[in-house]
Image: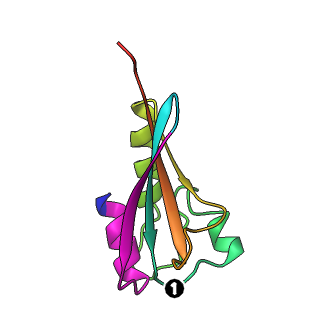
Amino acid sequence: MANLTKNAVEAGAHRMDISLRQQDDHTDILVSNDGCPMKPEVAREVFVPFFTTKKSGSGIGLPLSRQMMMAQDGDLSLAERPVPSYSTTFILTLQTYIR
């Protein structure tokens, strides 16, 4: 969440929204912002280690965030279509464990 917030601010976002989408076996946390939209060629590469569009960026934030989610049986992805009235939406997927 910290990395997504930092990236949104660096993209010029003024608004962010966090919403939940409950499924049978998982919960999606949708993190949306109104910053500068990503170009399609950038969106395809955001999870590639060391890919960055920032002069001072390292390109490890999103790939590392995704690895951390996957280590917990979850995922981090970029939504094909952002939540309406936002330019970018990331989806954090958390598995639901029934005990």
Question: Which quadrant holds the C terminus?
Answer: top left
34 magenta-colored: no
Residue at position x 67%, y 63% in the image: 44
- x and y percent of residue 80 in the render? 66, 62
- x and y percent of residue 21 in the render? 48, 48
- x and y percent of residue 65 in the render? 41, 50
The span shown in magenta is 3-22
95 and 73: which is toward the camera: 95
Residue at position x 63%, y 68% in the image: 43
7 magenta-colored: yes
89 and 8: which is toward the camera: 89
Name the outermost residue toward the right: 41
Q: Which residue is mark 1?
A: 36
Task: Tell me if residue 63 comes above or below residue 3 in the rendering.
Answer: above
Residue at position x 40%, y 58% in the image: 19
Question: Which quadrant holds the N terminus?
Answer: bottom left
7 and 87: which is toward the camera: 87
Of helix, strand and loop, which one carries label 1? loop
Residue type marked 1: Cys
Name the outermost residue toward the top: 99
Task: Tell me if residue 64 comes above or below residue 46 in the rendering.
Answer: above
Check the image and tell me how it is coloured. rainbow
- Quarter where residue 2 is shown: bottom left
- x and y percent of residue 93 in the render? 47, 42
- Quarter where residue 3 is shown: bottom left
Q: Is residue 16 left or right of residue 49?
A: left
